[in-house]
Amino acid sequence: MIESGDLKKGICILFRGEPHLVVDKTFVSPGKGSAFTRAKLKNLKTGAVLEFTFKSGEKIEEANVHTIEFQYLYQQGKEYFFMNPRNYEQISLPEEMIGNFKNFLKEGDIYKIMVLEDQAVCLIPPLKVSLKVVETEAGAKGNTVTGATKAAKLETGFVVQVPLFVKAGDTITINTETGEYVSRK
Amino acid sequence: MRKILKIREQIIDAVRQFFKSQGFIEVETPLLVPYPDPSPFNEVFEVSPVLGKRAFLTPSPEFFMKKLLASGSGSIFQICKAFRDSPELSPLHNPEFTILEWYRINADYKDIMVDCEKLISFLSKFKILNLKFKIDTPWLRLSIKESFQKYAGVDLDEFLDFKKAQEICREKGYQVSENSTWEQLYHQIFLNEIEPNLPKDKPLILYDYPAPLAALARLKPTDPRYAERFEFYLAGLEIGNGYSELTDGKEQEKRLKQDVEARKSLGMRLFDYDKDFVAAVKNLPPCGGIAVGVDRLIMALTGAKTIDEVLPFPAKKIFSS
């Protein structure tokens, strides 16, 4: 059992008897009123999304989900295939479950997947990933002050804006929520 | 960035022009005080003592503005910072924000509603803004009772009874525990069933709040179960909260004492209430007043989705690690 104040993005709860993923949550407070938590919930069985505002201190039951590590294998059409390295069990996730993170999936890397009753629910994307730059123009030397950027193609095919000093072959860290360059390794 | 600085300047300037043209005086009252408003709905920031007394930042300039009104200032307005401490930040709140309060003597909340309509009409003339809603007057006015009936199918007169309120909430599938207060049950219905369905394409006034939510408003002489309090919404955002001001010193003191007790049971900061304020309320001329969140007003007029977009230095930025 958790309390409404403990709700956060990515956890699974039972809402009106059905398992729901907390997609987003904000704090709301009506004028001259106490604190409430508004959560955006996705029904894991039907995919329906709804919003609900909880009073503070409401008791909420967590859904019985497990987080399992899977290795990313490959993509075929709109399905992404993963393997559990412990038992070689394979599963596939549709593109909607991966969302924007599809731009950062690297073959062979390990990712956390949320599973409910033997069904994959969603991928839990790491906030940051390190990927290699495979293609980018040579930047003007010494130009580190102005904050100018150029396009760089990552090993996953995704193109990101980077500072001019980044070269092809460099490994950089990307914020997966914003798709932005963070730093160079 | 420069654009938001320009917009803030123009709007605040225009607000000043508007009230001066109405014959109001602009005032400045203390933001550092010994006895802030004890309302349990706004936690206050405490700072180092002043002259040996505990000191706090005001969540609203109301108390001191009423002291001015009681001493014969006439109609007044103020644009200043207000401070409210909260455990978590929401996209619509900043712990330090700009507040506009005005008090019109020999007036009631209906006159303040008209002030709001005139003020927004005046502000909407600026081309720099990005209005996503029409501002024809008169604005839609809905009583809280009507809104509960229309959007939640609840008879608010019935809901005023605590046991009935618990029953209604349980029937609707909300969790009702022995700790749930009447205010929580009321707002849970309001936030889930009413507020999301209020029209967002035009301004809206919600008025006549249940007595437990009267705050500093006087109760309706014709029906003391309700108070002469209103809120106005622009683009779905609650912008202002106005009243026919309470001028009964005894009633005011009673509410302040209740607020202090509520603070005790909620484990909030404890401090004495302002006795000079109680004395001022006894001498208040009949007046209507209102507090407006200026940053929220700017959000509504520019189409901004979060308060950070209209602040040059949001708390989330300057206080982040």
Image (cartoon, rainbow, N blue to C red):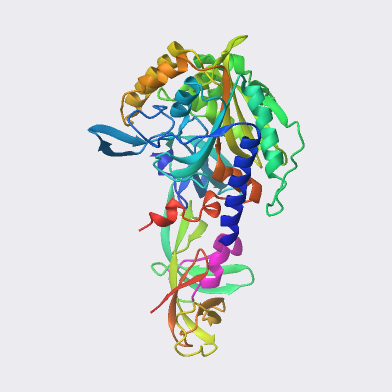
State the quadrant of the C terminus of chain B: bottom left
Relative side of B320 to A134, left or right: left
Q: Which residue extends farthest top? A: B222
Q: Nearer the viewer, residue A146 or A12?
A: A146
Q: Residue at x 74, y 39 (%)?
A: B135
Q: Which residue extends farthest left? A: B52
Q: Is residue B27 magenta?
A: no
Q: Position of residue A122 (x, y in %)?
A: 51, 58
Q: Position of residue B114 (x, y in %)?
A: 69, 29
Q: Nearer the viewer, residue A9 or B299?
A: B299
Highlighted range, magenta: A88-106
Q: Residue at x 56, y 42 (%)?
A: B294
Can residue A75 be seen here? The reply is: yes
Q: Position of residue B68 (x, y in %)?
A: 47, 25
Q: Is residue A121 above or below residue B272?
A: below
Relative side of B198 to A18, left or right: right
